[in-house]
Image (cartoon, rainbow, N blue to C red):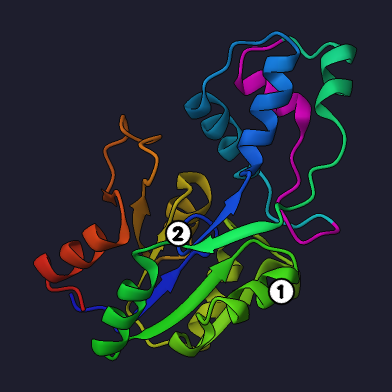
């Protein structure tokens, strides 16, 4: 099957943000005396975010701290709940991944429709413009604009209004990107930049250069 459209996540797929949200949690958990791993916190946070379909006031997946601690096998005492509370505003520092521009140019050369699907605040539009990404895509579907977040199937269906089928989605969070796309009847490829999904047997790549090889090898675009 040859795909006519490619949907792409933005954060940690095309654009990196520092510090990442799970890194902020690691700092607070370790300060509270818990020896947690980056992989453990990332996977726990992803599972919790995957249980929500509608954004908070910022446009992002709301995170239930109690649920997060449950996923980490930590007893949710009042003290730890207070320590994990506070400011979790999106990180200000961002950059374009080295493989992002090459991948976008590759997709454009294949004459496929490219649509960005992102769980993000309105600031993401400024980030996309400042990094020169918008010229490569037909549309940007952002949770802050449409009122639903990945993994809700509706956000992927909004993208289909701008793109031809069949389509494939590429993103870095299993519960949001991979599962969300599948729920919407769209094929999916998991981007595992940090090796956090090394134990999962799904279609995945480690970077966007590998994604190009994957698409070419299987003659998907």
Is disc 1 placed on a helix, strand or loop?
helix
Residue 104 located left or right of residue 209? right
- Compare residues 94 and 35 and report the one nearer the observer: 94
Q: Quadrant of the C terminus?
A: bottom left
Disc 2 target residue: 13
Residue drawn at point x = 59 percent, y = 11 percent: 35
Q: Which residues are magenta?
A: 57-74
Residue that appears at 44% across and 69% down: 8
Q: Please name which of the two marks, 1 or 2, marks the residue nearer to the observer.
A: 2
Q: Is residue 98 above or below residue 179?
A: below
Looking at the image, can residue 48 be seen? no
Residue 171 seen anywhere in this rendered image of the structure: yes
Relative to 205, is 15 on the left or the right? right
Q: Position of residue 11 (x, y in %)?
A: 55, 58
Q: Secondary structure at mark 2?
A: loop
Please give the residue where the numbered disc 1 appears in the rendered image. Answer: 146
Q: Is residue 137 left or right of residue 71?
A: left
Q: Quadrant of residue 74?
A: top right
Horizontally, is 109 left or right of 14 in the view?
A: left
Residue 171 position in % (x across, y down): 44, 58
Quadrant in the rendering for residue 217: bottom left
Dominant secondary-structure state across the stretch colored magenta: loop
């Amino acid at each position: 099957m040859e795909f006519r459209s490619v949907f792409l996540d933005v954060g940690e797929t095309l654009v990196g943000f520092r510090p990442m949200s799970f890194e902020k949690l690691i700092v607070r958990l370790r300060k509270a005396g818990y020896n947690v791993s980056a992989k453990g916190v990332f996977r726990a946070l992803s599972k919790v975010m995957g249980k929500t379909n509608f954004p908070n006031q910022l446009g992002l997946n709301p995170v239930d701290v109690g649920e997060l601690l449950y996923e980490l096998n930590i007893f949710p005492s009042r003290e730890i709940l207070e320590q994990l509370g506070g400011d979790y505003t999106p990180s200000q520092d961002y950059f374009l991944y080295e493989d992002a521009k090459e991948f976008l140019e590759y997709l454009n050369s294949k004459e496929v429709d490219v649509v960005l699907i992102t769980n993000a605040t309105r600031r993401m539009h400024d980030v996309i413009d400042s990094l020169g990404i918008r010229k490569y895509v037909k549309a940007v579907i952002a949770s802050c604009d449409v009122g639903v977040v990945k993994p809700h199937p509706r956000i992927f269906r909004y993208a289909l209004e701008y793109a031809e089928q069949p389509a494939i989605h590429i993103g870095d969070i299993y519960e949001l990107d991979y599962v969300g796309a599948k729920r919407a009847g769209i094929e999916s490829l998991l981007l595992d930049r940090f090796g956090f999904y090394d134990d999962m047997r799904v279609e995945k790549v480690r970077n966007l250069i590998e994604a190009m090889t994957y698409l070419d090898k299987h003659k998907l675009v």
